Image (cartoon, rainbow, N blue to C red):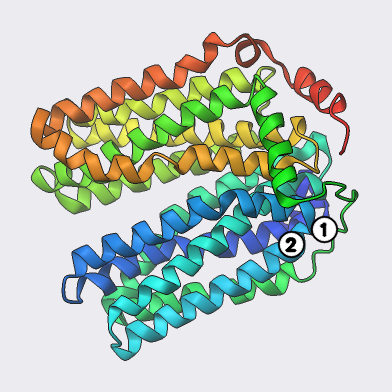
Amino acid sequence: MIKSFITRGSLRYSPFRRFFFARSILLFGNAMTPVALAFAVLQAPHGQRLLGDILAGELLAHIIMLLIGGHLADRYRRDRILLWTTLGFGLSQLCIAIIVLTGTNSTWILPWAIIQGILTAFSEPALRGIVPEMVDTAHLQHANALLSAARGFARIVGPAAAGFLVATWGGGWAIAVNAFSSFVASLLIIRIHIPRAWKSTAPSIVHEMRQGWVYFRESQWIWPITLAWAFLNALQMGAWQVLGPIIAQQSFRSTGWGLILSFKAAGILIAGLVLTRLRFSHPLRTTMLTAAVGGVPMIILGLEQSVPSLLTAAMVAGLGLGISTTLWDSALQQGVPRDKISRIMAFDDMGAFVFIPLAEIISVPIAHTFGLYTVERTAGFLFLITALAPLTCHGVRTMTTHDIEAWALKQPLS
């Protein structure tokens, strides 16, 4: 059975097989860190403010360095970038674990968090761009579906494992486990060898970044979806991630909220498993239709409905999110030339993150002004409308998988 699993679909390619297992290990470790870090930092003096500074510092460093990370991933070997960033992430996590375990002033975590944000900015464009270098076009969706399933599984198991380690040994040891997972993943990544199939002829970094921007701007099927996700993620982070726990604290408490998040992660896991077999002829249209259901849990939460209805809505939203992100990654990997894909992915990631800090800052003041539940359900309706807005663009609404592949053939390597 195991042999059959690892020789099917995208896993028949040994580079991707190593990448998949390395990525699964990393996702599990990364899913532990938010819980472990939060409990470790909150015990320090002024812990709430410090935790906010740490999370904001890491995110801002990520956003600022993303475009440079996309440029580097297009210019140099993506497998080597992933190796060095994974090792760097493990070392930074180890330093944070030592700070926590030794009782050192927790403010020293902040510079390491900023380093991790920079490393993530370098690794993410390479991660999303390396998949089409390891599998052929026919197996791209299968590969992305497996990665999505691994992400969903990690979000279910990782926080629970972190909670157990925090309760028994302390947050520092949970962070140390994440560092160890990075080093183990590096042993698999070091065996991936994918020489670049092109040579950059751009005279400078600025010129290459300008090339990427022109391509992104002129791709009428890419930028409308990226723009939509800029607002969708802001609504998601502000209304769901910030206001959601506040509502939960006033009603069904943290246990119910944790269960809701687990059901959403289960939906992502199911989506990944389903997409290893199911295909859609219009992936862009399906991407936004399935993304739209992400607003349903916010609407139900804002209407003060029961926990069982929230559990169902969260699982459906996770299912939609898993399908949406998998199809979107697959479409970009099919439709963008390999020498530009990491820069385009960086622009896409930039859109995904750019409004999140603002949303996290203003969500609570807006809720105080207009009412917590009113803002929550309004955000849910806005999420649904925003997700459907790109369907007004002809390319998003009508492009088929064949059209996306044909688009790629018209874009020669630079």
Mark 1 closeness class: few <14, some 14–19, many ≥20 residues within 10 Å: some
Residue 14 - label: 1
Q: Position of residue 236 (x, y in %)?
A: 35, 36
Q: Position of residue 368 (x, y in %)?
A: 9, 36
Residue indicated by mark 2? 18
Q: Quadrant of residue 114?
A: bottom left
- Tell me, yes or no, if residue 277 can be seen here: no
Name the residue at 32% across, 21% down.
382
Which SS class for mark 2?
helix
Mark 1 touches mark 2? (CB < 8 Å): yes
Residue 414 - label: none
Q: Quadrant of residue 139?
A: top right
Quarter holding the C terminus is top right
Query: Does 72 sit above or below residue 291?
Result: below
Mark 2 closeness class: few <14, some 14–19, many ≥20 residues within 10 Å: some
- Tell me, yes or no, if residue 305 can be seen here: yes
- Of residues 118 and 275, the one nearer the viewer is 118
- Of residues 345 and 64, the one nearer the viewer is 64
For badge 1, the amino acid type reads Ser
